[in-house]
Amino acid sequence: MKPIQMVDLKSQYEKIKTEVDAGIQEVIDSTNFIKGGKVVDFQHNLEKYLNVKHVIPVGNGTDALQIALMALGFQPGDEIITPTFTFIATAEVVALLGLTPVVVDVDPDTFNISIDSVQKAITPRTKAIVPVHLFGQNADMEALIEIAREFDLKIIEDACQSIGSVYTFSDGRQVQSGCMGDIGCTSFFPSKNLGCYGDGGAIFTNDDFIAGKIRAVANHGMVVRYQPRPVYRGPSAGS
Ligand SMILES: Cc1ncc(COP(=O)(O)O)c(C=O)c1O
């Protein structure tokens, strides 16, 4: 008897081997490995598919979450609300940056973040909510967006398990997972919904300013390659 694999990457590869091998060979022939042509093509295809203004490819889902938090400029001691039930990376990056993870319960029917628990966890130090869309199922984004507006909080969606799923708002609007908050983060870990051959991730946003910050953080603070960032020296003398 053949055991049934939960994620059968080998059988999947065998079905698309010719295409995958040719694609990998093309990358090697081009020697354009980092932020190269194929990655840029993928970025633009994903922007179209998700109907989002900016897709910023990064190393993996954990990097995506960390870069998103850094780009929003949170300071040590700021509280970030996130669910108890997730992969450790979601809370781990919050703690790594010296921010305070405030873990709240999930809804037993969906395993997604409980709106009631979020409301109870808000303090004057709360700066953001990081909902996790688990198993391809989106959290109650309509309620979370309302809370974020009321308390002036950012929303960073952990869409590492949900790329390609769609959320329907009560007015009928349908939006791709990861594209409803200020920033969305996904993972292309091989066994994910959209897995890659190696490690990969991406950040999504519709905000041009935030996208610029994310690109800079993801690239050693550089906006232009090897150029120092312009320093603001205040209004020029005599003016
Ligand atoms: C919900 C969730 N968040 C974050 C991550 C981290 O992604 P990665 O393994 O690409 O760093 C994962 C995947 O393992 C995940 O399932």
Image (spheres, grey):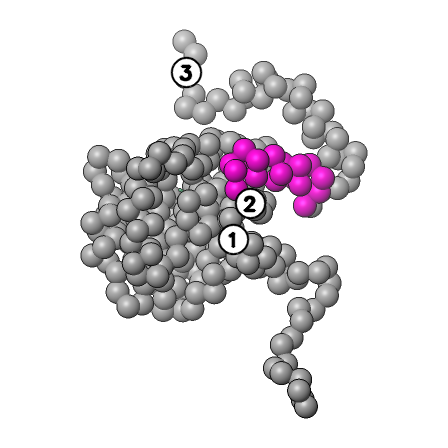
Q: Quadrant of the N terminus?
A: top left
Q: Nearer the viewer, residue 98 or 35?
A: 35
Q: Position of residue 169 (x, y in %)?
A: 34, 38
Q: Position of residue 205 (x, y in %)?
A: 51, 48
Q: Is residue 31 visible?
A: yes
Extreme top residue here?
1
Q: Quadrant of the C terminus?
A: bottom right
On the picture, is 189 further left or further right than 231?
A: left
> Within 10 Å of the Cα at label 1, are there few (<14), some (14-19), or many (20+) other Cα atoms?
few
> Within 10 Å of the Cα at label 2, are there few (<14), some (14-19), or many (20+) other Cα atoms?
some
Mark 1 or 2 closer to N-term? 2
Q: Which residue is mark 2?
A: 53
Q: Is residue 68 above or below residue 172?
A: below
On the picture, is 157 further left or further right than 199?
A: left
Q: Position of residue 41 (x, y in %)?
A: 66, 36
- Whether residue 48 appears in magenta in the rendering, the answer is yes
Q: Residue at the spot x=51%, y=31% of the render?
A: 194
Q: Is residue 161 visible?
A: no
Mark 2 or 3 closer to N-term? 3
Q: Residue at the spot x=40%, y=69% of the render?
A: 76
Q: What's the magenta region?
A: 35-52
| Dots 1, 2 in contact, CB < 8 A | yes
- Whether residue 131 appears in magenta in the rendering, the answer is no
Q: Which residue is mark 1?
A: 207
The overriding secondary structure of the stretch rendered in magenta is helix
Mark 2 vs ligand 1: CB below 8 Å: no
- Name the mark on residue 3: 3
Q: Is residue 233 above or below residue 39?
A: below
Q: CA distance from mark 2 to mark 3?
A: 43 Å
Q: Position of residue 171 (x, y in %)?
A: 33, 37
